[in-house]
Amino acid sequence: MADQDQLHRFIFETTSVRGEYVHLDSTFQAALSRHDYPPIVANLLGQAMAATVLLGATVKFEGSLILQLQGKGPMTLLVVQLFSNGSLRGLVNWNEADLPETDNLSSLFGSGQLVITIEASINANNKKSGRKKGERYQGIVEFGDGNIAKALEGYFKQSEQLETRLWLSVNDQHAAGLLVQAMPSNQSQMQNGDQEENDKESWNRIAILSDTVTNEEMIGLPFREIIRRLYHEEDVRVFEPEIIRFRCTCSRVRIEELLRSLGEDEVKDILKETSKVDVDCEYCKQHYSFDAIDVEKLFLKEIGPDMSRTRH
Ligand SMILES: [Zn+2]
């Protein structure tokens, strides 16, 4: 049985190459169970979820990392958000019943973009600057004629100047991914032509070995077995795995904030038409309902101290 919902990191000793492997099980199934996705949409979401975990493991962040694919084809939007505590959620929008049976991004999205956003959490940010909104990093690349793995390889090359290879594999219950990346050579080490030549050679060799991985192996084998099969002549050091889980960050408090930001007039107009205000989280489909009394309370809170007069 393959590892469930775990991220594994590993390095190739005496080289500057690192690797990551992710296997998603109940996390992927939880994301699927809340929506009625056509098979190709489910497949693409699985690829994007695995890819986002791999991407998240290559950068240090406190807050959330968002991988977004956007275009104007049969599919218009795919968003996966990973939080630094290992929670993951995703959503997909498409506007045609008959989607092409391919994972080629330009067939699905037309010409479009891959957008990577890192948002520092409000808590983490408050300590530093006291600003209300978190710090933001955004990288955007056009995706050409390829799948998510190719688009991300392009992103790493263009935005990070890092040689990277990725393999993603999804069936109806599992999503898995493998990544290898050539790290920048250690500056403190004595640099010479030999070292550079050595790094290049290691990278080429490991990339070729990794490329022999099959979809079945990635989905069905335990991590250690994959490593043994692919790299049996390499000196691989593996680290403790990390747990990934599906968890949406929506809450009634957050929805209340959202309604307050719409303004009292707007919310009361909705209330007049429908007698209650219903909000569904677009990520997890959790339903939130506010009746007339809830709405009154929502906007009363802002008055604050005045309420105390009625208490005695
Ligand atoms: Zn939610």
Image (cartoon, rainbow, N blue to C red):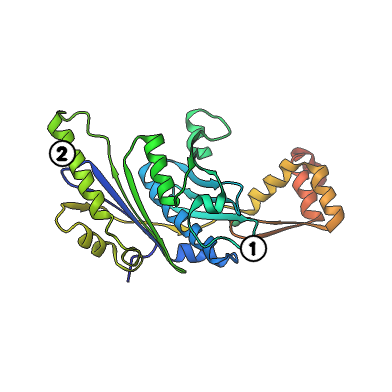
| Disc assigned to residue 259 | none
Nearer the observer, 208 or 127: 208
Which residue is at 49% across, 66% downward? 29
* Residue 175 position (above or below residue 302): below
Q: Which residue is mark 1?
A: 97
Q: Which residue is mark 2?
A: 198
Check disc 2 and report its element: helix, strand or loop: helix
Rendered location of residue 230, percent (x, y) = 22, 59
Q: In the image, what residue type sits under mark 2?
A: Asn
Alpha carbons under labels 1 and 2: distance apart = 51 Å
How many other residues sit within 10 Å of disc 2, few (<14), some (14-19) or many (≥20)?
few
The quadrant of the rendering that contains the N terminus is bottom left
Q: Which of pointers 1 and 2 indicates the residue nearer the eye? A: 1
Q: In the image, what residue type sits under mark 1?
A: Ala
* Residue 126 position (above or below residue 114): above
Which residue is at 50% across, 45% downward? 66
